[in-house]
Image: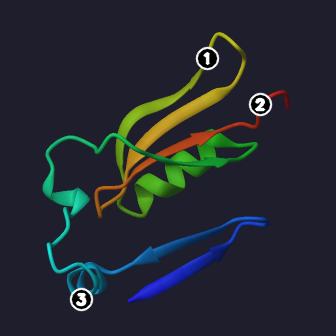
Amino acid sequence: MYGELDTGATTLAFAAHAMGDMNYSCGHVAAHSSEKPLGMEVAFTTTDVVAAHAQAIAAGAQELSAPAEKPWGQVVSYLRCPDGSLVELCTPMGG
């Protein structure tokens, strides 16, 4: 029902909807129940956005925006996970 990723100085945690039901008496919104992505994202940096994007699609993510180079030189893509989360994959800034 709960998991964490060791991302260095910050811990990124995930919880099952059942845990939300247990902890919030007023309920919660399941991101996958919305037709459109929610107005927040989790971003992951990688030196190979194209490969990470393809791997995410193979694992069940929905492509929202294919990898593309932005005017400032960063390669960025957007995906929606099966749970509804919006994910940005991007190359590091200045790298």
Label of residue 22 in the image: 3
Residue at the image position 20 percent from the left and 82 percent from the top: 21
Residue 33 rendering spot, x and y as whole percentages? 14, 58
Label of residue 93 in the image: 2
User: Between disc 1 and disc 3, whose residue precedes?
Assistant: 3
Q: Classify the position of the C terminus by image quarter.
A: top right
Instruction: Give the amino acid at mark 2.
Output: Met
Label 3 sits on a secondary structure element that is: helix
The nearer-to-camera label among 1 and 3 is 3
Instruction: Give the amino acid at mark 1.
Output: Lys
Local crowd size for mark 2, using a 10 Å CA cut-off: few (<14), some (14–19), many (≥20): few
Which one is in front, 28 or 65? 28
Labels 1 & 3 near each other (Cβ < 8 A): no
Label of residue 70 in the image: 1
From the viewer's perspective, is 26 left or right of 62?
left
Residue at the image position 20 percent from the left and 67 percent from the top: 28
Label 2 sits on a secondary structure element that is: loop
Label of residue 35 in the image: none
Residue at the image position 77 percent from the left and 31 percent from the top: 93
